[in-house]
Image (cartoon, rainbow, N blue to C red):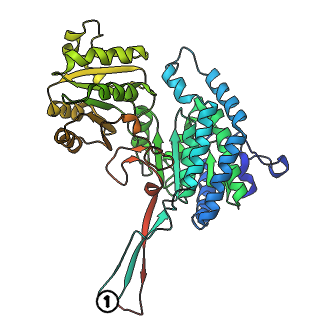
Amino acid sequence: MADAASTEQGVDLRPSSAHPEPIMDHATASDPLIEIFGARARSAGALLARSSTGQRNDALRAAAIALRAHAPAILEANARDLANLDPHGHRASEAFRDRLRLTPARVAAMADGVAAVADLPDPLTKILAEWARPNGLVIRRVPQPIGVIGMIYESRPNVGADAAALCLKSGNAVLLRGGSESLGSATTIHAAMQAGLDEAGLPRDAVQIAPSADRAFVAAMLSASGLIDLIIPRGGKSLVERVQREARVPVLAHAEGLNHTYIHAEADPAMARAVLANAKMRRPGVCGATETLLLDAAIAPALLPLLIADLAALGCVFRADARARAILPDLPAAADTDFHTEWLDAILSIKLVDGVQEALAHIAAHGSSHTEAIVTQDRATAEIFLAGIDAAVGLWNASTQFCDGGEFGFGAEIGIATGRLHARGPVGLDQLVTYRYQITGTGQVRP
C-alpha cells in the first residue's frame, strides 16, 4: 500500500481519521516536489504492475460507483470552475465552456466509461507472439506496462477519469496535471478514482494529481526523466508545442484536430448534409470536429446552399473561398490563415475543389494528421482518398466525430496520437503497454 502521506492530492473520500496531515501544502511545484510525486508513482506502479486483473477491475468498478455517488460534489465543483472563467478572456467562448462543462449525463457517461474499461480484456495477460528456434529455445513476446505516465491536459475534466482508468487497467501509474480552469472539477474526480484504489487494496499513489495549477509543475514534469516514462499532452496547439519543445521525457503527442470533410461529386446529398452537420456541430469544441468543408465544385451550386442553411440553423458561421462566395455572395470571405485554423468553435471554413486530387492536396497542405473524412458513393474514389491522406484516422461516409476511443470500442481514450511512432489515433489500453521477451530453454548454451 502507498504511504500515508500520499493523500494530499484532491479531496479524500475516506473517513477523516484515515487522512493524515498533508505534506508540503505550501510548496510551489518544483523539482523536489516532482521527485516526491514521481518516486511515489514509481513505487505504486511497480505494485500495480504485479496486481491481478481482478484487483484492477475491482478498483475501476469501485471508482465508477464513487463517481456516481459523488456526482453532486463533482457538479458543484464544475459550476465553480465555470463561474470563475473570465467572461472577457480568450476562453470565454461557448465552445470552450462546453468543453469544461459537466452535466449529470456527462458525469454518468464518465462513470460508465470507467466501468466499461473494467470489462475490456486485460492487455497484460496476452501473449503477443511465440516461436521456437532450431536450437529448441522458445521465445515469447509479452506485454508490460510503460511505467509512469505523465498526463497534461486542459479544459475537459473528464480526461482525468479516462486517463486514470486506462492507466490503472494497463498497470501504469499516472500523474495528472489538469488545467487551471478545471482544477476544482479535476480534483473532485481524482478523489473518486483514488476511492476505487482504496476499495480494491491497491496503492492510491497509482493515480496522483498535481497539487495546484502552478505552471512550474508542468516544467518539472517535462524534466522528470527517470521518474516519468511517457508524457501525454492533451490540449491546444500551444500546450503540445511547449511539451514537445521542452520535454526531456518521451512524448506521445496529440496534435490539433484540423480535420476536413470532403464531399465528393458522387455523394448522396441527404447523407452529406447529415454527416457534415454532425461532424461540425455535434460538439464543435472537440478535437474530432470538422473545421473545413471541401466540396466538389460540380455539385456545389445545388448542394452548398442546403449545407449552409442546415449549419446556419444550428448556429454555425462561415469563412468561404471565392468560388463558394460566387454561389452565395453573403458568405464571409476566408483569409488564407483560416484554412490553417483549428476553430474549436461553431465556425466552418469552406473551399470548393475539382475532384479528389485537389482535396488531397489541400489536406496535405493544411491538415494536422488527425482525422479526415470523405462522403461519396463511389468506392474507387473513397479508396483513393483513404490511401492518400496522412492522417491517424480516415472515414468514409461517417462523421469525423467518431474519432473517439469510446466509439472505437476502447472504453475510453487517453488522447489521439498523430505522430508516426508507437501509436496513432485513439490511444487505449493496447497502446499503453510495451513488451519484453521471455525465453525458455532446456539447458542450451551458445556455441
Q: Is residue 56 above or below residue 70?
A: below
110 horizontally vs 133: left or right? right
Q: Amino acid at mark 1?
A: Asn
- Decide which of 71, 76 is in the foreground and name it: 71
Which residue is found at the position 50% from the left and 65% from the top? 124
- Decide which of 339, 259 is in the foreground and name it: 259
Q: Position of residue 112 (x, y in %)?
A: 59, 44
Q: Position of residue 351 (x, y in %)?
A: 23, 21
Q: State the quadrant of the N terminus.
A: bottom right
Q: Is residue 393 above or below residue 292?
A: below
Which residue is found at the position 30% from the left and 92% from the top? 447
Which residue lies under the disc numbered 1? 135
Q: Position of residue 425 (x, y in %)?
A: 38, 46
Q: Secondary structure at mark 1?
A: loop
For label 1, count other residues whose C-alpha is less than 10 Å away and answer few (under 14), some (14-19) or many (20+): few
380 horizontally vs 431: left or right? left
Displayed quadrant of residue 203 = bottom right
Q: Position of residue 133 (x, y in %)?
A: 31, 84
